[in-house]
Amino acid sequence: MGYFSNLAVEVCPADRPDDSYPSAERQLLQRLEDLRERMKELTMEGALYWNGAAYRENSLRYVLPEYLCDIYSAEQAMRLAKADLLSKYAIDASTPDDRSIAGEEMDGYEQITWISLLFPAGVLQSA
């Protein structure tokens, strides 16, 4: 169980939804994005396409991307994540830029950073 601070709730406007616990849809989108990053890492470092290891479908569905050490396993995990997005949430994630989460605005809200929480607006400008 993770720890989630109430500081963001006190700083955020009251009409903003609580983002402490991401929804299952958002978690799956984040997983797909992490798998894409792992695929880039594997191709850049020249990893084997298939190293002889065989994962079961449920193992590939939930394994952490850092533990995938061949390109074939990463491709299969991405295929499963895309199929889950399509079947459960009717989201076609065939293009890489669909509903990307990291560092972008999502549903009209900007991302809160630690700097904006620690130093409210105007404090950094006056220094």
Image: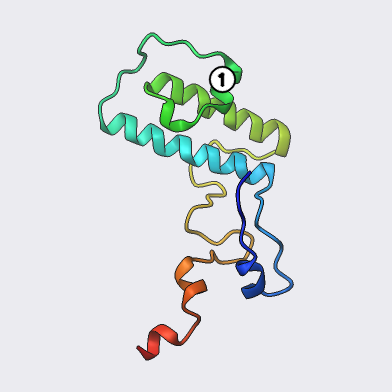
Q: Quadrant of the C terminus?
A: bottom left
Q: Position of residue 44 (x, y in %)?
A: 27, 33
Horizontal side of residue 20 vs 74, given as left or right: right
Q: Answer above or below: position of 50 versus 20.
A: above
Residue at 66% x, 73% y: name it: 10
Question: Which quadrant would residue 53 be assigned to in this image?
Answer: top left
Q: Residue furthest bottom?
A: 126
**Crowd class of label 1 (few under 14; some 14 to 19; many from 20; radius 10 Å):** few
Q: How is the image coloured?
A: rainbow
Residue at 38% x, 8% y: name it: 52
Q: Position of residue 54 (x, y in %)?
A: 47, 10
Give the number of marks: 1
User: Is residue 3 at all visible to an observer of this figure?
Assistant: yes
Question: Which quadrant would residue 17 be assigned to in this image?
Answer: bottom right
Q: Quadrant of the N terminus?
A: top right
Residue at 66% x, 68% y: name it: 9
Tell which of 55 and 84 is nearer to you: 55
Secondary structure type for disc 1: helix
User: Is residue 95 at all visible to an observer of this figure?
Assistant: no
Q: Answer above or below: position of 86 versus 2.
A: above
Q: Which residue is mark 1?
A: 59
Tell which of 99 and 111 is nearer to you: 111
Q: Answer above or below: position of 32 versus 62.
A: below
Horizontal side of residue 17 vs 67, given as left or right: right
Q: Position of residue 7 (x, y in %)?
A: 61, 69
Amino acid on which the number 1 mark rests in the picture: Ser
Horizontal side of residue 49 vs 121, given as left or right: left
Q: Position of residue 86 (x, y in %)?
A: 66, 33
Residue at 47% x, 58% y: name it: 103
